[in-house]
Image (cartoon, grey):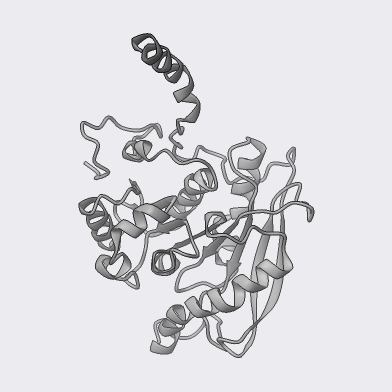
Amino acid sequence: MKQLLFASFFLWSFTAPAFSQNVVKQAPDGFDILRADIPHGKIDTVSYASATVGTQRKALIYTPPGFSGKKKYPVLYLLHGIGGDEKEWLNGGRPQLILDNLYAEGKITPMIVVLPNGRAMKDDRAGGDIMAPDKVQAFATFEKDLLNDLIPFIEKKYPVLTDREHRAIAGLSMGGGQALNFGLGNLDKFSWVGGFSSAPNTKRPEELLPDPEAAKNKLKLLWISCGESDRLITFSKRTHDYLAEKNVPHIYYIEPGGHDFKVWKNGLYMFSQLLFKPVDISSFQKYVYTENGTPAATDTGSSKQP
């Protein structure tokens, strides 16, 4: 019996590293620069009927290099901020270049990325008073548009996997709050959730996750990141503190920067590499910023930042 146990341990000691998850490092210089020597994905504009809003609405769709209608893909819904629309990520964040470069390096799982307009109202442009009550409310209304109109449209038009294990949602600022609100509020729909510099529209933690045990069982990955000098960091921190108190596994990544695309692009760079892959929650504690992009030493198993 002892020999069997020793043999089992010996085998495990050599095979376990194969299942470990490498910590994704801070984005290097050039991660968002166009490279002419690699295959590129494609950006399309689509129009879908929204029963929620009562009009046709637009979204951008990124399909990866080598996209084929003969295979099925997981989907990331990537949301913009209060001052933007479906083109904000494209204009300010270069998500297609970030993803193209990651594909060329073999670092991400092929996926379709949907960039919708998160302001669910008939005049959904980002003009005028963007803080007007009806425009702010439209960001909450988008939950119904997303679940009832956009997702069914994407699943009818594109070859996508339709289970929650293959559906992710993330966003910046107002979109980060939406991602946390909608993702954690619909654990039957999303298993991968990311908030980059989430804004004050983020629900209080007790509302976000009234049942922490359900989150532990259903979430594959919960990512929260923010710039350390961002005045909105309190909304990310209070969510992190609650999750840590309830022992809900998550990554809390604070880096130098403010409320800007430098932080948001890095959030996409790091978050996207973890999607739709086996997850090792023991690696979450290692996501602490250092200047060379490697994890800082930690002395506990806590996910809290020092």
Q: Point out residue 187 in the picture as x, y percentages from the top left corner.
A: 43, 63
Q: Is residue 26 left or right of residue 165?
A: left
Q: Quadrant of the N terminus?
A: top left
Of the pair 98 and 165, the residue shown nearer to us = 165
Q: Quadrant of the C terminus?
A: top left
> Residue 158 occupies which quadrant of the picture?
bottom right
Residue that appears at 55% across and 73% down: 85
Q: Is residue 44 left or right of residue 280?
A: right
Q: In the rendered picture of this protein, how many numbered marks are placed on residues?
A: 0
Is residue 135 visible to the viewer in this orientation of the structure?
Answer: yes
Residue that appears at 59% across and 42% down: 108
Q: Is residue 98 above or below residue 106?
A: below
Q: Is residue 49 above or below residue 301?
A: below
> Residue 181 occupies which quadrant of the picture?
bottom left
The residue furthest top is 3
Residue that appears at 45% across and 73% down: 82
Of the pair 177 and 218, the residue shown nearer to us = 218
Q: Point out residue 153 in the picture as x, y percentages from the top left corner.
A: 67, 73
Is residue 224 visible to the viewer in this orientation of the structure?
Answer: no
Of the pair 92 and 105, the residue shown nearer to us = 105
